[in-house]
Amino acid sequence: RVLGCSAPQLLCLLAVALPAALASCPASDVSIVQDGAYTDMASSWIQTHQGITEDKMAVFSGEFRLLCKSEPIKAAALRARIVYRSGSEAYVPKEGLQNVAVLANAPGSYQFSFALPEKQMPSGEYKAEIFFVGELTPAASISMFHSVPFIHGRHMEILAMIVLAAQTYYVANQYSQSQ
């Protein structure tokens, strides 16, 4: 008997605890390889009593690999917390995105994604802080930039027509002066 446990109990305890101990890596020893960070807008049209309205979602996705002292970290239980800042302000947690799931893909590869209505996602820098489940200190992070166009939809088409008309006028004016 060791530590008050019988041999089978001790063996079972070691079988459970050893992989967890080997998988853990102090945050200071973790490095990240960012394979991709994507932001996009998804639009859908919805028929309502007032007519057809556009529903826009801001979509974010990140893919990465984690290393512990240059060795791949495989199949770790991870979560992400999303923080936001505009300009040089301090990061603030993004409401509703404090416990984003991180999925393990191919050995050593991870992915997260989330989407919120455009109105809840202003332009700025969004950072996914990656945590080992149960840890309070982030092990790594991925930054993503999101911008909401100032002009969009029909307004963009009208602006394009005005710019095109101005260019046509300028070229015609230059041509007539050269004749």
Image (cartoon, rainbow, N blue to C red):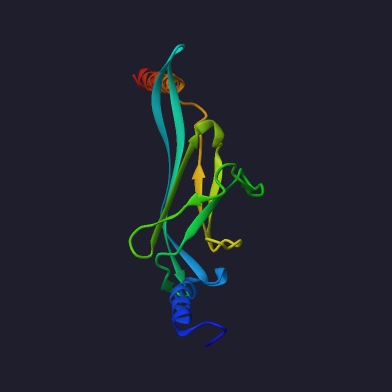
- Between 140 and 95, the residue placed more toward the observer is 95
Residue 90 falls left or right of residue 122 = right
Quadrant location, the C terminus: top left
**From where the camera sits, is residue 163 visible?**
no
Residue 170 image-quadrant placement: top left
Count the numbered circles shown.
Answer: 0
Could you tell me which residue is drawn at 49 percent across and 26 percent down? 151
Residue 77 falls left or right of residue 88 = left
| Residue 152 location (% of width, % of height) | 46, 26
| Residue 2 location (% of width, % of height) | 54, 87
Could you tell me which residue is drawn at 34 percent across and 65 percent down? 107
Residue 94 image-quadrant placement: top right
Q: Looking at this view, name the residue that lies furthest to the top.
A: 50
Residue 92 falls left or right of residue 158 = right
Q: Is residue 160 above or below residue 137?
A: above
Q: Looking at this view, name the residue that lies furthest to the bottom.
A: 1
**From where the camera sits, is residue 6 visible?**
yes
Could you tell me which residue is drawn at 52 percent across and 82 percent down? 5
Q: Is residue 29 above or below residue 120?
A: below
| Residue 114 location (% of width, % of height) | 46, 43
| Residue 145 location (% of width, % of height) | 50, 45
